[in-house]
Image (cartoon, grey):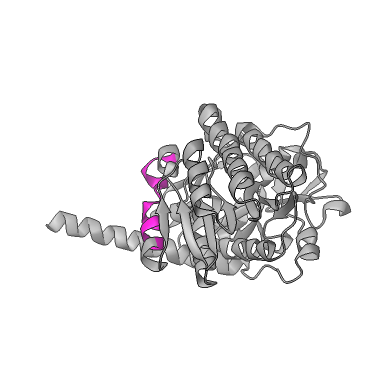
Amino acid sequence: MKKLLVTGSSGLIGSEVCQYFANQGWFIHGIDNNQRAVFFGPQGDTRWNQKRLESQIKGFVHHEIDIRDRAAILDIIYSLKPDAIVHTAAQPSHDLAASIPFDDFETNAVGTLNLLEATRQFAPEAPFIHMSTNKVYGDAPNQIPMIELATRWDYAELNYQYGIPESFSIDQSKHSIFGASKVAADIMVQEYGRYFGLQTCCLRGGCLTGPNHSGVELHGFLSYLVKCNLEGRTYQIFGYQGKQVRDNIHSFDVARLIDEFIKSPRCGEVYNLGGGKDNTCSILEAFDIVSSLTNKKMIFVYRDEHRQGDHKCYYSNLDKIKTHYPNWSITKDLEFIFSEIVAAWSDKLTLNQHHEICKSTS
C-alpha cells in the first residue's frame, strides 16, 4: 500500500488531502502540532479535526512534529520513505506575520527547506507538492488597470480577463512579511525540482475554503464571514469599499489536482490554483450570498484602510493547469461552497450551544 505524508494534516487542505487519498487506498501519515492554535488562539484550534481524522481514517497515524524541527523531519522521512509528500503546514496569515517575523519565516521558509532536504536524501522519487499562495505576487496585481463596478473591482485589460497567469512577476512589489516567507519557500521548492531533479510543484492558492476550516479573522475569509453572520458578530471590512475580489476553490478540488500531479509529476512546476473567474465574489457579494442562505443580515463595520500587500482583485488563470492536467476541473461551484460552509458552522454552533446547556444544568 502506498504511503502519503501530509504536513498540516489537521488543517483545511491537509485534512481534505488525508481523506481523499485514504479513500483511494493510500496509507496516511499526518504531521501537525496544532500550531494554528498558537498563532490564532483557541478559535484556531484544530485538535477537533485531528480527532475526526483518527476516527474516520483506518490506520491513520498522527505525528506530533513541528516542521521547524530539522532532526525530527529527517527522521520521519528516513523511517517512513513516503511515496508522496503534500506540504500544507504554514503560518498562513499575512497580517499576523509582521508581529512574529521569525516564527513566520522559520515555519514557512525553513520548515519547507527541512522537508525538501529530507526528501532529497531519503525519498527522492516521491512527488513533493507544496501549498504556496497567490501572495507570492505581492501587490503587483493592483497595478493592473481596473474598473469599479457596483459591487466589485475587475480587471480592465483583456490580457487578464481570465485572471492572473503563472508568468506574472513576483518581483518589485510589496508582499507582506508572510508573502516574502512564502516566496522563499516557493522558490526553494522550484529549485529542488530544477537543480536536484525532484518532482516538485508549487500550488499558488487563491481563497482555499471548505467546511473543515477553522476560520478566524486573520485567516479563512469565507469560513470566518459565515461564522460572523450566524453568530451575529460584527465583520470588519478593510478598505477597497468591500469590493475586493477573490476566487474561491473547495478543498476537494485542491485534493483532486494534487492527485493528478502525483499520477503525472513534473519537476519544479508552479500552478495558480483557485476557483477561476466563475468562482469569484467580492466581500459585498459574499454578504448577500450568505444572508440569502441564513436569512440573517450581515453586521459589519468599514475601515478605510486596506491590509498591506492585499489584493484589490485577484483570481487565478487556470489555463496552464487545464493544459497539463486535462482531467482536472472545478467541480464545486460558489453556491455549493457557501451552502456547505453555512451547514457546517450551523452544526458546530448548535453542538456548542448544547454543550453549554449541559454544563449549566449539571
| Residue 168 lies in quadrant | top right
Asked if residue 351 is positioned above or below residue 154 in the image, the reply reads below
Q: Which residues are magenta?
A: 40-53
Residues 83 and 187: in front is: 83
* Residue placed most toward the observer, 115 or 118: 118
Residue pictured at 78% horizontal, 54% vertical: 163
Residue beneath the point at 84% across and 50% down? 156
User: Foreground residue, 142 or 121?
Assistant: 121
Q: In the rendered view, does 21 fall on the left or right side of 309?
A: left
Image position of 288 with respect to 101: above or below: below
**Where is residue 333 drawn, in percent x and y?**
63, 68
Is residue 233 found inside the magenta-colored segment of the image? no
Q: Position of residue 257 (x, y in %)?
A: 66, 63
Q: What predominant SS class does the magenta segment belong to?
A: helix
Residue 135 visible from this viewpoint: yes
- Say which quadrant the C terminus sits in: bottom left
Q: Position of residue 18 (x, y in %)?
A: 50, 62
Which residue is rendered at x = 54% and y = 54% of the image? 81
In the image shown, does 149 or 29 lie closer to the viewer?
Answer: 29
Residue 342 rendering spot, x and y as whole percentages:
47, 63
Tag count in the figure?
A: 0
Q: Quadrant of residue 348?
A: bottom left
Q: Could one spot residue 306 in this view of the protein?
A: no
